[in-house]
Amino acid sequence: MTIDKGDKLPAGGAGGSPAGAGEGTVPRRPASPIEFRLDAASGVPTYLQLVQQVEHALRLGYLKPGDQLPKVRDVVASLAINPNTVLKAYRDLEAKGLAAGRPGQGTFVQAGLSQVTLPELAGLRKSLLGWLAAADEAGLDENGMVALFTSALRDFHERRSGPRTRGGAAGDGTEGVA
Amino acid sequence: MSMSMNVIEASGLGKRYGGTWALRECSLAIPAGHVAALVGPNGAGKTTLLNLAVGLAAPSAGGVTVLGGLPAGSPEALDGIAFVAQDTPVYRNLSVADMLHLTRSLNRRFDQSYARARLNELGIPLKRKAGRLSGGQQAQLALTLALARRPRLLVLDEPVAMLDPVARHDFMATVLAAMVDDGVSVVLSSHVLAELERVADYLILLSRGRVQMAGEVDDLLAGHRILTGPAAEAGNFAERPVVHASRAEAQAHLLIRAAADDPVPPGWEAHPVSLEELVLAYLREPGAAALPGPAREPSKVTR
């Protein structure tokens, strides 16, 4: 594994002193909208934690196409992790088509995971909270809610991707639950 | 720096103190661009290997080269390597400024402005006596003096053993940032296993003066897995090398060498192995076969 200079600003480059000329014309590039954290107890490999945090941020709209991912040097200096680990995570995101490296600048978000706007997300979240309250009212504990949601999600997925021969909701046995 | 070169290459390397071999028939090749961790129990030969590589000791057998073939201890080798010895020693009665001056006059290459800027950034006053700095500051001072020599290889012997968690984190963050900024390769010895997984991407396991296992961490982890299943069947794994087995009456856990796509036997569950688990298993089984590292020569038996 080698360090890709593409995610490193050359010495004295734009990342160095912001006191250079042209302050009035070029707005200072904002830092990445997100910051990584590590959960040492999770058992999830470090590079995968970084990948998952980017995907999570994309889903929730914290990251949008064109946004910069944290610079490798900044991640290394703040978390004290191996730079090759960060590069591995960014390569993984590139392979998934979610990010792209720009030589001499860093790695940027290429595509979003969510086509949903923030207000829409907020609305969906609100109705989900309503559902959670109803489930709680009915006496379901947290594990029960997760199990029910996961099972419903599986049904939803099957119905959408599977052959549409079964016709509607009949025959999948969910009616009797309530 | 060529990424395909080896920063340390040893062949049949041995060091004897009196009648005792501290290191024996050591053959390895550590590629550039990594943080390579040298692990092993006390007395395994870690410090001896590092001392031989930086030219502080002469081999009793075999040879060692650094930075793509330079003889260890040669002037060219010394120019390219910075070494921070165990307990990050500083001269307690010298001021920080005196330490800077001393290091500068002892080395052909020394970046004074880098050193001053870093000490300023760290809030370490130049007038302060080195002995009056905190443990973390003393370690950072020793590291700053080492990095100011602009090395291509940074060698650290048990760098964080004496430091508190915050100082440990800050010290390693400085080392890893230097990797990004200057492309420096790092070889360090450590027995703080828990933190290795975040820091090291290359591992050399030394045991009783010999290399037991060496390779890229990702490859080592991908080449091992834990199998859990009925203890009665634990004997059926003769064809797969079992590194370490722990078994109770009914259930057994086996750490085996296996590729990711190896089939799991019916009735058994496979789990990925963590670096700490892997190292502990090998340390507990000093006889377990070593894995060949890349570009490693067949060890020469001279007997």
Image (cartoon, coloured by chain):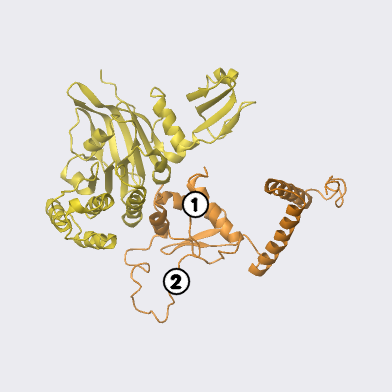
Chain colours: A orange, B yellow
The label on residue A135 is: none
Residue drawn where x is 53% and y is 67% of the image = A66
Host chain of mark 1? A
Q: Secondary structure at mark 1?
A: helix
The answer to whether residue B95 shows anywhere in this view is yes
Determine crowd level at label 1: few under 14, some 14-19, many 20+ residues with C-alpha closer than 10 A. many
x then y, percent, for residue A161? 76, 51
User: From mark 2 to mark 1, how far is it between C-alphas?
Assistant: 23 Å
Q: Specify the amino acid type for callout 1.
A: Ala
Name the spot of residue B125 as percent of width and height, x first.
Answer: 21, 61
| Tag 1 residue | A89
Quadrant that contains the C terminus of chain B: top left
x, y percent for residue B134:
25, 52
Q: Quadrant of residue B229?
A: top right
Are the residues under marks 2 and 1 on the same chain?
yes
Q: Is residue A149 above or below residue B124?
A: above
Which one is nearer the viewer's eye here, A163 or B96? B96
Q: Is residue B4 left or right of residue B225?
A: left
Give the total of numbered labels: 2
Where disc 2 sits, the SS reads loop
Q: Residue at x 56, y 64 (%)?
A: A62
Question: How packed is label 2: few (under 14 Cα within 10 Å), some, or many (20 or more)?
Answer: few
Amino acid identity at mark 2: Arg
Does residue B205 appear left or right of residue A134 in this picture? left
Task: Please report, as a chain letter, where disc 2 is located.
Answer: A
Above or below: residue A78 compared with residue A24? above
The first of marks 2 and 1 along the sequence is 2
The one of A96 and A33 positioned closer to us in this rendering = A33
| Residue with the mark numbered 2 | A29
Looking at the image, can residue B290 be seen? no
B23 shown above or below A45: above
Closer-to-camera residue (B137/B143):
B137
